[in-house]
């Protein structure tokens, strides 16, 4: 019986030893007079929560060597509750004094033993206390993927534990707030004379879970059991609190944080998300169009264009390039195909290839008072220089520009080559011209469009009827600051700005002032000619690097009356004065009008005499016929 009892006693002792070996033990600090507070072993196994964990350790001169060893012991004891590994918890450590000294990164060690040995090997810096600098390094370097932090989309909690014993020599509040906003959960551990307000400025909310203060380094070991419950994981915070996260809630030890899905960023409220606009800063460099995607700002091209390999510029798709179109006269590259065309005076046959001549003016029934022009669809009446066509489309009238009434559209270059300061000078120039005009409901109307890569109508001809309202609208204009598509602007002006929908009036002279400071990225001659042929008087104003040939292609004839150039923006005042004296003064003189009226009167007289002569000849012919009949009867 005694032997059985003795055997049972030894069995229980052996099992107790085995159980004790399986429990993580706090490591005693080295030193003869030091004691380490032993933490109560966990009754349940620690739940393995993968973390990216960075220790930020104060190594200032105020910490005595014995206390420094206690901090190392505290770290090693804390590691017992962390499942260290590349796929589990990754650990990094940096210490700081007057400078930051990283000891090892998140991707340096993959076992707890290696981390513990690295902690034991640390040497005391014994310099200043730059806590803010250490937190900044933690946010900008320690938690980067290069240093071993896992990508944010994996939702691995990022934990920083700051241990300090004194007042920082730099500011910590702003940089700690930035770190917390970046998704780093910060535990602030203070020892001794640390100010509690400083710890609260560092630690995450709630402070009751993240901010801890002990009286001395001998008591720091009392925090082991506190952090064991936090780091080993309890309930999923996202499951037990009303987190109100718009996209994703991420549980972390003793807290939670909101995250956004890819392509979104967290708003300052820490709850809601907004879509990231990668194009917002305007640095994409796209020639034509752009689109913000989940990851970047992507350049696009308009219809009938394709993106070049540089990913920025566009080239036109030329369906006619292979020469297989078979067109008899002309051809045109469109968005979808190469289309045959005919020269003026011809029309395309049903085969879509060959042309036949078509002159709508050939029968002489056009009824035009002065001149006419055969187009593809009809015979169109035209007026000689100095006259404008009346609404009947047949007769002409003397222009009214000399009376100070016109529809005037400014076409203003807003490309990035101007710069914001010069753009303000251009706005002053526009308002200077407006001051010289008779702006009213029945007087001159003004519209304005700005162009760069795109064209934007700032206000239409029918929008304002006072000079004050126009000048206010000019002052409110926002600088576009991109490319320079003058041809597109001229097209917009020709097709839309002088339309009835935008306020253009019938029988009112149409004038456009085109301002540019450099070479256009597209062709200007086509739409400038169309505008001029439609009766719009074009003034071309160039400054700085404007191209003379382009200005000549834009300006109405003669060039000396409609083309102005200044070497720089400081000389724009000279252009303003010359232009003011020129607008609406190019009317035919009375002498010329008299000559025109005399010519018309002479033509009418000749026509009348010819008519009378033909009538007389017809009467004489009838008399001769009657006489011949009488002779035959006799």
Image (cartoon, rainbow, N blue to C red):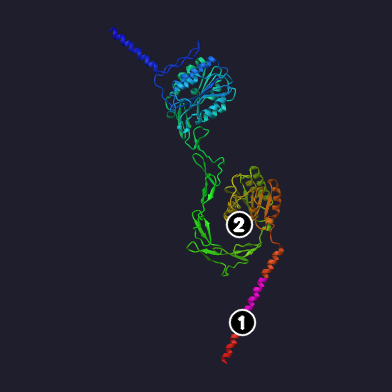
Marks 2 and 1, how far apart at CA = 53 Å
In the image, residue 92 above or below residue 70:
below
Nearer to us of marks 2 and 1 is 2
Sequence order check: which comes first, mark 2 or mark 1? 2
Q: Which residue is drawn at 70% across and 45% down?
A: 570
Q: Position of residue 2 (x, y in %)?
A: 29, 7
Mark 2 burial class by Cα count in 10 Å: few <14, some 14-19, many 20+: many
- The quadrant holding residue 556 is bottom right
Q: Name the residue under label 1.
A: 619
Can you see residue 407?
no
Q: Do the residues labelled 2 and 1 touch (CB within 8 Å)?
A: no
Say left or right for 352 vs 612: left
**The C terminus - image quarter:** bottom right
Q: Where is residue 620 in the image (x, y as percent from the top left)?
A: 62, 83
Indicate which disc residue 123 carries: none
Q: Mark 2 points at which residue?
A: 531
- The quadrant holding residue 197 is top right
Please check the rendered image and state whether residue 554 is part of the magenta-colored stretch, yes or no.
no
**Helix, strand or loop at mark 2:** helix
The residue lying furthest to the bottom in this view is: 634
In the image, residue 349 above or below residue 544:
below
For the stretch drawn in magenta, what is the main secondary structure?
A: helix
Q: Where is residue 515 in the image (x, y as percent from the top left)?
A: 64, 50
Can you see residue 348?
yes
Q: Position of residue 442 (x, y in %)?
A: 64, 55
Say left or right for 41 vs 126: left
**Helix, strand or loop at mark 1:** helix
Which of 565 and 511 lies nearest the eye of the viewer? 565
Q: What stretch is highlighted in magenta?
A: 602-616
**The N terminus - image quarter:** top left
The residue lying furthest to the left in this view is: 1
């Amino acid at each position: 019986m005694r032997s059985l009892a003795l055997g049972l006693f030894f069995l229980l002792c052996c099992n107790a030893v085995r159980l004790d070996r399986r429990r993580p033990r706090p490591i005693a600090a080295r030193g003869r007079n030091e004691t380490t507070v032993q933490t109560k072993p966990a009754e349940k196994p620690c739940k393995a929560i993968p973390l990216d964990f960075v220790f930020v350790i104060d190594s200032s001169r105020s910490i005595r060597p014995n206390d420094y060893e206690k901090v190392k012991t505290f770290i090693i004891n804390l590691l017992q509750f962390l499942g260290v590994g590349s796929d589990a918890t990754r650990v990094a450590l940096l210490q700081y004094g007057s400078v930051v000294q990283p000891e090892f990164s998140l991707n340096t060690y993959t076992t707890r033993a290696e981390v513990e040995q690295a902690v034991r090997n640390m040497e005391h810096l014994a310099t200043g206390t730059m806590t803010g600098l250490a937190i900044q390094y933690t946010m900008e370097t320690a938690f980067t993927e290069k240093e071993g932090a896992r990508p944010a989309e994996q939702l691995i909690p990022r934990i920083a534990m700051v241990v300090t014993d004194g007042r920082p020599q730099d500011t910590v509040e702003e940089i700690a707030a930035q770190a917390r906003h970046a998704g780093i959960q910060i535990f602030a551990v203070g020892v001794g004379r640390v100010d509690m307000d400083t710890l609260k400025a560092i630690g995450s909310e709630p402070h009751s879970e993240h901010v801890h203060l002990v009286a001395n380094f001998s008591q720091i070991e009392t925090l082991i059991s506190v952090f064991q419950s936090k780091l080993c994981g309890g309930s999923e915070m996202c499951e037990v609190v009303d987190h109100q996260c718009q996209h994703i809630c991420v549980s972390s030890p003793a807290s939670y944080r909101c995250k956004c899905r890819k392509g979104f960023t967290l708003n300052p409220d820490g709850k809601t998300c907004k879509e990231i606009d990668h194009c917002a800063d305007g640095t994409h460099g796209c020639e034509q169009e752009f689109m913000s995607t989940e990851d970047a700002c992507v350049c696009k091209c308009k219809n009938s264009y394709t993106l070049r390999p540089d990913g920025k510029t566009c080239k036109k798709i030329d369906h006619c390039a292979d020469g297989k179109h078979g067109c008899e006269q002309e051809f045109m590259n469109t968005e979808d195909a190469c289309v045959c065309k005919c020269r003026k005076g011809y029309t395309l046959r049903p085969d879509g290839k060959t042309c036949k001549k078509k002159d709508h003016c050939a029968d002489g029934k056009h009824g035009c008072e002065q001149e006419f022009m055969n187009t593809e669809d009809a015979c169109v009446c035209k007026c000689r220089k100095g006259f404008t066509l009346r609404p009947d489309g047949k007769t002409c009238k003397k222009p009214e520009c000399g009376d100070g009434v016109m529809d005037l559209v400014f076409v203003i270059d807003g490309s990035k080559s101007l710069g914001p300061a010069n753009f303000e000078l251009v706005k002053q120039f526009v308002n200077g011209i407006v001051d010289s005009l008779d702006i009213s409901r029945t007087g001159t109307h003004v519209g304005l469009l700005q162009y760069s890569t795109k064209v934007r109508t700032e206000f239409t001809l029918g929008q304002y009827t006072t000079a004050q309202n126009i000048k206010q609208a000019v002052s409110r204009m926002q600088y576009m600051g991109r490319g320079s598509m003058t041809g597109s602007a001229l097209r917009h002006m020709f097709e839309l700005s002088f339309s009835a929908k935008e306020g253009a009036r019938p029988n009112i002279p149409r004038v456009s002032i085109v301002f540019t400071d450099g070479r256009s990225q597209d062709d200007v001659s086509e739409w400038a000619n169309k505008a001029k042929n439609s009766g719009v008087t074009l003034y071309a104003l160039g400054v700085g690097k404007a191209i003379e040939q382009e200005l000549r292609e834009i300006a109405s004839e003669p060039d000396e009356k409609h083309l102005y150039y200044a070497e720089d923006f400081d000389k724009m005042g000279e252009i303003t004065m010359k232009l003011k004296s020129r607008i609406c003064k190019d009317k035919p003189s009375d002498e010329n009008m008299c000559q025109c009226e005399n010519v018309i009167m002479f033509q009418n007289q000749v026509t009348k005499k010819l008519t009378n002569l033909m009538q007389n000849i017809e009467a004489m012919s009838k008399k001769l016929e009657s006489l011949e009949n009488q002779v035959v009867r006799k």
